[in-house]
Amino acid sequence: MCIPHLRFAPCFILLLLINDFLLCNEKIRFRPDFMYYPAKSCSGRIKKFGSGASLEDIVVANNTQEFESLMVFQPVSLILKTISTTRSYLSRREYNVTILDCIMSAAIKGGCEVVKEGKAEVLFTRTVFYNPVQEFNRDLSVSVIRMFTEEFLNSKGIKVSFAENMKEVESVHKEMSVTEGEGQHGQGESTTTAEGAPEEEDGGCGDPAVHAGVKCEEGIHVLEALAASGLRSIRYAKEIPGVKNIITNDIAAEAVEAMKRNIAHNHLEAIVNASQADACLLMYQNPSHFDVIDLDPYGCAAQFIDPSVHAVRPGGLLCVTCTDMTVLCGNYGETCFTKYGAYSVKATYSHEMALRILLYTLQASATRCSRYIEPLLSVSADFYIRVFVRVHSGQAEAKHSARKTAVVYICTYCENFSLQRFGQIVSKSNGNTKFTAANGPTVPERCDNCGGRYHISGPMWAEPLHNRSFVNKLLEHVKDHNSQFNTAARLEGLLTVISEEVPNGTFYYPISKFCNFIRAICPSQIKVRSAIMNAGYQVSGTHCSAEGIKTDAPPSVVWDILRAWEKENPVKREKLPPQALHILEKGTSINVSFELHPDANPPSRNQKLRRFQQNPEKYWGPKKKAGPVAPQESLKERKHRRQGKRSRQEDGKPETGAAEVKPNEKALKTDSLPRQHQNGCEKRER
């Protein structure tokens, strides 16, 4: 094999080392009669040499497809580190590194699924968890952290720009850096970032503004403690301006390999660092270090709350997701108490109760560290809840946690509720205040409305779920940059509904279920809203439920309105249960008017915004945990195979796709067992 010029000797040796690595690993095989090396003279195109060929015999490939067809690729982790090191080596010697990008792209196509979301492009295998439905969650997180970062950098006198990056490189082959004298943009030297945007000498924090994808030395430190593939961190690095460093962590080796592959694929080695460690240990080892901590576990987040409060800086942002909704919504109250320190009760407004239980758990953890929380945004969406809270330091304010915490009395029949706070503040004559225990109980032994008994739920957060000014600012940001989010329509609808919510309302009222208790026809929401407004109270919808109504009116007023509605639309009382008769026999304490109120129809409904999204795809919902072995059949195939399984068993037919069992083999299996086991087999067959 000939070497045309000695200037290519270092590069040739490195590529031979790569070849040896790959051949030993039996993952990638080069054709033995070809030699490949990058050449600046041909703009990085691939040169193909036959054995003993001269320079006149060089064939220059026009694209990467010819090169990729010469090799057999499968998913590899070893090649990534070698390619990254070689790329850096060649860049310092003015060689074009396109060949290495060709190797990587070909290796990727062998066994990974390429997923594009936002500005990120990541590679997935079946061993790493990924749920496309959570794109809305990630879009919401990007927008919230953008607002937090803008406030953080503005306090330091640094401007932030959310506009699209400057001229992106049109070439398919991206370079990590340019040599001295190249890439001049205006005055002074600059380096090229992953997005092709120029980075100033001061780390991107100079005039005029900081852009996304540029490392900012005065920017925020971000930790994604449970990163899986690293998709969220890559989106943060590419879409949030003013980021200094992102630690993307996971304890699973397969996930860390996926992170490194995706970081290299997006050219973000300067901003995103992969870490393999226990999330709790990592946060405990870095007290008050991170400005933003993102917790998005598979299931419960309770075990990560204490270390995250310990690791976030004063004034920092915690982003927490919980998907164990069956626990938080009251199906397993005792499990909720062991995990979150609060007992959940199953009710129609359980999704808001889940948010308040999670906020209480965060507050209790912060109070033990002389800190307190400020909820910016709390969302119940799809099959999970997501909260964004700022954690501040201050012993004086932490003492207010008792008055912000309450238990809730919930009627077992009509679901009337009443809050019982733990503490209160008493003002003295000299102007000072004193913290005392709250007076109670707030309810009698039986419900005034229906005569039912009460269940006790909590403790939970009793203050507003959102910061109204922050939500309005976030809504304006989403409207101004809706082209940057794939789920912008749903984001705008959700934030609009949240901005309309009554701040002092604790839970929402499910009017349709209340009407079901008394067997009455359900009135329209416009009529119920008008009646509440005509009575002098505030009313709004809720983002937790399409049928819920939130108001600062007491439950007795809501039931007075429903009793007045039943008088206009009477029901047959002889068939009603005693609790429903008890409700209807009570008189009304207010004058109810169903006359249409001009503000009864909210702006989100008038504008026909996407407030509550339908299922985006078939078989939609929480995904199964990622496993080391790819499943043999998809969920769709499995459901099709199991369709009508019981009817086939009754007819004696085998399950579709399953091996048939001969009658004599079946008899041999059961006849060799004792009689009691034979009976058990027969019962299972039936």
Image: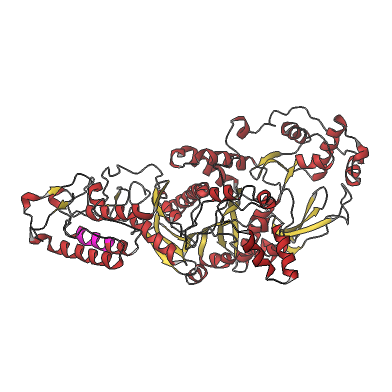
Q: Which residue is painted at 72% across and 58% down in the image?
A: 344
Rendering coords of residue 645 (x, y %):
64, 50
Q: In this view, does 641 lie to the left or right of 592?
A: left
Residue 658 magenta-highlighted:
no
Indicate the quadrant where residue 672 lies.
bottom right
Indicate left or right for 126 with 166 as reference.
Answer: right
Is 632 situated above or below 520? below
Q: Nearer the viewer, residue 134 or 272?
A: 134
Residue 621's x, y, as percent?
58, 49
Residue at screen point 23% across, 67% down:
20
- For the residue pair 368 and 214, the one nearer the viewer reads as 214
**Rendered position, 354 above or below 303:** above
Q: In which quarter of the image is the C terminus?
A: bottom right
Report the side of 393 relative to 513 (left or right).
Answer: left
Task: Give the percent coordinates (x, y) of residue 547.
Answer: 70, 40
Residues in magenta, as a range: 83-90
85 drawn magenta: yes
Instruction: State the predominant SS element of the stretch in magenta.
Output: helix
